[in-house]
Amino acid sequence: MTVPSATRRPAAGSAAPDHAPTAGRFTEVADGVHAYVQHDGGWCLNNAGLVVADGESLLIDTVATEARARALRERVLRRAGRPPRLLVNTHFHGDHTFGNFVFPEALVVGHERAREEAAAAGTHLTGLWPDVCWGDLEVVVPAVTYRDRMTLHVGAHEARLLHTGPAHTTGDTAVWLPGPRVVFAGDLVMSGVTPFCPMGSVSGSLAALARLRALDAVTVVPGHGPVGGPELLDANEGYLRRLQRLAAEGIAAGLTPLQTAREAGPGPYADLLDAERLVPNLHRAYAEALGAAPGDPLDIPALFREMSDHHGGLPACHA
Ligand SMILES: [Zn+2]
């Protein structure tokens, strides 16, 4: 018997096609463990995660705009049956945190530095892309913070929060589920997207990748781009090692980070989205090569302007 398409309904929780332009798509990567991926992973199009077990749920990150956050909430309710009581922010960036406010039932958890950074940043990110329809955002910072590690229990699932030191920012958290061997890496890992570490550290990002590698995860949910396995760690590591090499060569040749970026170009990483990040990334690599400590503040607005000039205009943000 054929079912008329108008009456055919997707089963609850299935990965039904979703045509809303502001929505991502959930995929179940292990029993009760879901990755929410927003195509194409470029500027402000981040991933989130959801762990559902025994009537409990944990949300990992939210999204950048009010419309995207409301779409995420609707899909979370569809998967979990009720609002999550726990929400972890992997770091302070607005694409991962601005949607916190549409989950008022959730206790927001993050690294202590992520709370400070989120409070200091406010909605600053919206000013970088004034044409994006951000909605009526209300900044909600983590109410519970930790320093080194913390474990959350979601029904039978154990979710271990790991802080790796300055890497993508100074307050990054990876969420490790030792049962199904899934790690939600936040922006410590990008997939098909250029890594971005001017607010953290190149050497720290490499140390974070080594720490994630030691987990021996089967599934790696990156902060941006498609879900993968440990091979994602290799790609990120290769990019970061090239940054260090380029910085050492640039310094030896008396070139500025911008000159080095112009001369070297994206090289073998030309296929990654948002290649213009090479400029601010090189600034961080230079600073470290010249003795700055991981996470020492750089002038991020100035780096963003230089990156935009190098790119020939403001990079596209499709949030
Ligand atoms: Zn980020």
Image (tube, grey):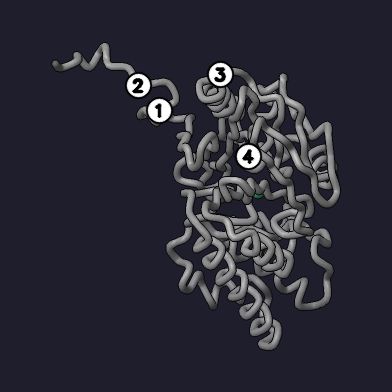
Give the Cα distance between marks 3 and 4: 25 Å
Horizontal and vertical percent for residue 137? 68, 26
Give the Cα distance between marks 2 and 3: 16 Å
Residue 10: mark? 2
Vertical relation: 112 (above or below) 269: above
Give the residue type at disc 1.
Ser
Q: Earlier in the sequence, mark 4 or mark 2?
A: 2
Instruction: Give yes or no for contact between labels 3 and 4 (Cβ–Cβ under 8 Å).
Output: no
Nearer to me, 247 or 208: 208
From the image, tell me which residue sits under label 1: 14
Give the residue type at disc 3.
Gly
From the image, tell me which residue sits under label 3: 81
Q: Earlier in the sequence, mark 2 or mark 3?
A: 2
Q: Earlier in the sequence, mark 4 or mark 1?
A: 1
Horizontal and vertical percent for residue 105? 72, 19
Give the Cα distance between marks 4 and 1: 25 Å
Give the Cα distance between marks 4 and 2: 29 Å
Q: Nearer the viewer, mark 4 or mark 1?
A: 1
Nearer to me, 145 or 219: 219
Residue, x 50% and y 63% (percent of image)? 231
Give the residue type at disc 2.
Pro
Residue, x 63% and y 58% (percent of image)? 196
Residue 95: mark? 4
